Image (cartoon, rainbow, N blue to C red):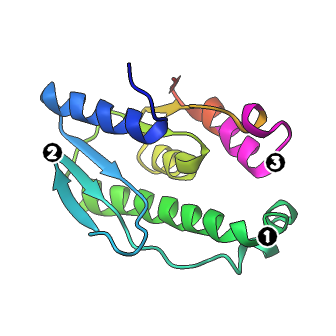
Amino acid sequence: MLVGGLGTYAENMTRKFVEQGHDVCVFSLNTGDLPTHEIIRGVEVHRPRIANASRIFPLISWDLGNWGTEVKFFSDLFMYNAMSATKLANYLVRKEGYHFDIISYHDWLNSIAGMMVKDELNLPTVFHTHSTEWGRTGNGSGIISSLERESAMSSDGIV
């Protein structure tokens, strides 16, 4: 039995995929002090550096204005998602010739990238939800609930 949430689950699943002979490529958030690319236990890890877009988001949505200082977290996630999806589609697939059978993404934290890659490359996607905004907080953020709902509706599978 595994305990520890999304990160522990993803680490153990990717390790098992590698053990079964699959090529695994992971995109992860970069705090600024991590390498942008490395191989860890056979898993190719990409961590694009992100630009700060937090000044922009309160202009876009009233809901984000309510996030206060946490809008920087949403900004980081948004930029990481956009940059990761762009790198995967334009660099790995179109330039380097990588072939992916399926795109798997977890929770609302990665839903922007998952939906962008699906739209850009028309690949099958699986949305993993470990909890929902409604289940975590009751009403919570409308933005997070919308991302969860759209990810579930547009994915080819849900775990």
Mark 1 vs mark 3, CA separation in Å: 15 Å
The kind of residue on which mark 2 rests is Arg
- The residue stretch that appears in magenta: 135-150
Mark 3 or mark 2, whichever is nearer to me? 2
Q: Nearer the viewer, residue 113 or 38?
A: 38
Q: Is residue 76 magenta?
A: no
What is the quadrant of the N terminus in the image?
Answer: top left
In the shown orientation, is residue 125 left or right of residue 155?
left
For mark 3, give the secondary structure.
helix
Disc 2 packing (10 Å; few <14; some 14–19; many ≥20): few
For mark 1, give the secondary structure.
helix
Mark 1 vs mark 2, CA separation in Å: 39 Å
Q: Which residue is mark 3?
A: 142
Which numbered circle lies on residue 68?
1
The residue depicted at 50 percent of the width and 39 percent of the height is 106
Our reading of the magenta stretch's main secondary structure is helix
Q: Which residue is mark 2?
A: 41
Whichever of callouts 1 and 3 sits on the residue coming sooner in the sequence is 1
